[in-house]
Amino acid sequence: MRLTYAMAAMCIWTSVAWAEEDRSSGTLYAPHCKSLLSAPKNTFMEGMCLGMLQGFAGVGRGLPAAIRFCQPQDNPYKDLLGAVVRFLDAHPERLNEKFGVLALAALREAYPCP
């Protein structure tokens, strides 16, 4: 019986810790995006970072004017990734924001539309 209570308490404790962590923040994504540039580990979060950038790259020119960006057609994803990593490094005070918001701001800054 004690084991059951201990296991229940442990489950509740870990679920509370999970709920408190923001799973979409720049803080969570930044190290994984950076590792893609230097030493990829093929982790789930690296895939999430690259997948989000690929998605944005596909629609960048069609976004509303406030968030639109215009990267060159033949621009490799590594360049997009570099632009985002540089932006995250330059704005550590914004890492608590959603990664998608930060990535779009970085891409808009790096590739403004004419």
Image (cartoon, helix red, strand yellow):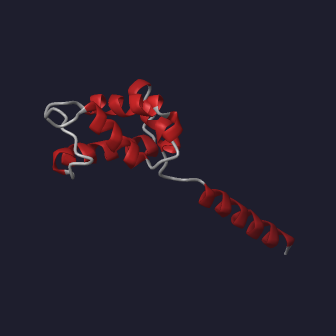
Q: Residue furthest top?
A: 38
Q: Is residue 1 above or below residue 78?
A: below
Left or right of 113? Residue 38 is right
Relative image position of residue 22 (x, y in whole percent): 54, 53
Number of marks in the image?
A: 0
Q: Nearer the viewer, residue 100 or 5?
A: 100
Q: In this view of the protein, can residue 64 be seen by the observer?
A: yes
Please report the residue visible at 28 percent of the width from the left and 28 percent of the height from the top.
79
Tell me the quadrant of the picture where the N terminus can be found. bottom right
Q: Is residue 83 left or right of residue 94?
A: left
| Front in this rendered view, residue 107 or 56 | 107
Taking the spot 14% from the left edge, 31% from the top edge, the residue there is: 74
Query: Residue 51: x, y in percent?
Result: 32, 45
Q: Residue at x 19, y 35 (%)?
A: 71
User: Where residue 34 sits in the image (x, y, percent)?
Assistant: 44, 31
Along the line of sight, which residue is nearer the eye, 78 or 84? 84
Residue 48 seen by the camera: no
Q: Residue furthest right?
A: 2
- Image x and y of residue 37, in percent: 39, 27
Q: Is residue 83 left or right of residue 4?
A: left
Left or right placement of residue 69 versus residue 29 in this view? left
**Which quarter of the image is occupied by the C terminus?**
top left
Q: Quadrant of residue 84?
A: top left
